Amino acid sequence: MTVNAFASLSAAARLQATSGSGFGPLAPILDAPPPDGVLDFTASQTFTWTPQAPNAAAQTAYAFRRYASPSGGYQWWNAGSSAWSATEVYNTSSTASATFSAGSWSNGQDWGWSVSTQNGTTLGGPYATNQIVTGAALPVVTFTGPTGTQTTGNWTITWTDSASTIQSAWRAVVYSSAQHGASGWTAGVGPSMADSGVVGGVASSYAVANLSPDTYWVCLQVTDLTGVTSAWTADSVVTSYTAPAAPTVSVVWSP
């Protein structure tokens, strides 16, 4: 069965799509950051979307707008000059993303953002519904121990937070060298030797036990009182000792 996607559009969408010559695109789907996401704008950040159209025409340009929530005026990104503009700008590009260098946005502010696209008809489609992203510095966690080669399989992981972080939760995960070296390894995902799970509170240590000699990778992550979570750390701990020999059992017959 053939589905007529255009016929399924609302009257307003059909009118927009057929205004002028050819079909204009529909509003894109905003993919990342997610609604009410948090980004640290002291670092480079990328926003992505998925163009939508009632025909097969690909994106040829986009307009990216933002405003300081709740009521700031719109600004449009000019990719050519890498600057914000008070007037609408369509940037020629088939790439459904925009990357902003550190400092292009500011932390300590909620921002609304949206995108409109053009296809080969040069008709600008409607903007997607605005999504909110919060600019905030991520908490920083620093691994502090154990240090040096460990001569036992029982040791305690310790860490500190950045001065601006008030920790509300934490997680510590320990991976063997084989687990850490596996294809596609990602901190916080997959098999591990020890995993605290997400633990609420301000503790800054986690004990592990019964680890065999190996080079282990300790990954730490903390969340602050505002609900913002840090990036993962990844630090190695060498454990080297001679494990006791396996016991043997002898059976002695006694008449």
Image (cartoon, rainbow, N blue to C red):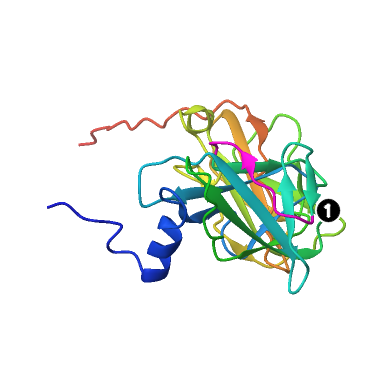
- Circle 1: residue type: Ser
State the image coordinates of residue 61 (x, y, percent, origin top left).
Answer: 57, 42
Instruction: Describe residue 129's horizontal placement relative to residue 11 as left or right.
Output: right
Q: What number of labels is visible?
A: 1
Q: Name the residue under label 1.
A: 162
Q: Where is residue 122 in the image (x, y as percent from the top left)?
A: 53, 44
Q: Picture coordinates of residue 48 (x, y %)?
A: 56, 47
Residue 247 horizontal side relative to residue 98, left or right: left
Residue 144 located within the stretch drawn in magenta = no
Q: Is residue 91 magenta?
A: yes
For this view, does 14 lie left or right of residue 162?
left
Q: Which of 103 and 15 is in front in this view?
A: 15
Quarter of the image holding residue 13? bottom left
Q: Which residue lies furthest to the bottom in this view?
A: 70
Report the magenta stretch's main SS: loop
Magenta-highlighted residues: 86-95
- Rendered location of residue 139, percent (x, y): 76, 55
